[in-house]
Image (spheres, rainbow, N blue to C red):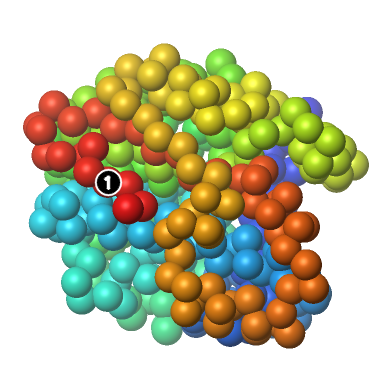
Amino acid sequence: MSKTAIDNSNIIETNNDACQCKLYAIERGYWKDPYLKLLAHSTQHERRTPEISLGYYVRVYGLRSLIEKFIKLTNAQCQIINLGCGFDTTIFYLLDNENLKFKHFVDVDFDEVTEVKSMRIQRAPFLQKKFSQANQSFKIPCGFHSSLYTILPADLRDTTQLDSQLKRLFEHGILDLTLPTIFISECVLVYMSNEHSSNLLKYLSQTFSQCCLFVNFEQINMNDRFGQIMIENLKQRSCHLVGMDSCQDKASQCQRYLNANFTSAQCVTLNEYYQKYLNSSEKQRIEHIDGGLDEKELLEQLFEHYCFSWAYRDEKNLGLNRITFE
């Protein structure tokens, strides 16, 4: 097996780890998601600490908040591209909400992931029935296509390959370069070299230059002792944060977007989101699911090392600057 294949398998394994953490939190009642267990093919989950479950809750709801604001700002005249999607179920969450319409949703990941995700959707009637059939003559090897949803295999480190795959969608009228587009990225860029992530961001900002929003969730403040422990734990599982240079602080997170020709960028740690923007009654509910937190110091330490960042280009003057957690 080549080194690239080994590296890919280690990155893919992070999807399985995230699924297990999410499934445990869902089972405990942090949020509802009847779809993930069908995609992940898992019924037994190891117990996770309340801090981990709270972290995944904030990750899911923070990203959904920004996606929903984008959809509403565009009056549903938008498209969504989920980069390094894994078994993420955002598409199903949106389809279940009548007020969250969109033109098309694309999940992108390694072909090893997209092939499995596509197969499990096609073999599970509960998932398959969510999608109306599209043009049967349009086929995506290792992928899936319906009128509203496409699963697209591509290595995000290879912008030439990504461009080739996206062009197929442009040529068949599935995606539209003139439509406002939101990109979702969850712990994806940090597993890419800075050169690869920079090339990806530049490609996206240039290709979708008229109106696009890039939303990212990943690590931050990795230089302190807590951050170094996180890095070492991942290294022991042969998972290397090769893009860590952009995860040093808010300034480095935002600068990567400005260097890639995005107009403006913002960054909020999970601590800030949790303390300033999460509904107090909801916060009280989730903190007591697993018997309450003995102390909040560990939660605050963990939340200080993850962040939401987002950046935009808005040649249409749609008002993407108004998309915040406020």
Would residue 95 appear left or right of 273 to someone viewing this image? left
Q: Nearer the viewer, residue 25 or 122?
A: 25
x 24%, y 61%: residue: 148
Residue type beneath disc 1: Ile
Q: Residue furthest right?
A: 236
x 73%, y 50%: residue: 301
Residue 168, picture quadrant: top left
Q: In the image, residue 120 lies at what x, y percent?
A: 52, 70
Q: In the image, residue 18 lies at what x, y percent?
A: 66, 59
Where is mark 1, residue-wise? 323
Compared with 162, 271 (above or below) is: below
Q: Nearer the viewer, residue 105 or 47?
A: 47
Q: Give the SS element for disc 1.
A: loop
x 69%, y 54%: residue: 300
Q: In the image, residue 167 lies at what x, y percent?
A: 27, 32
Which image quarter holds the N terminus? Answer: top right
Would residue 326 appear left or right of 119 to someone viewing this image? left
Residue 264, picture quadrant: top left
Would residue 43 appear left or right of 231 to someone viewing this image? left
Q: In the image, residue 177 lies at what x, y percent?
A: 17, 34
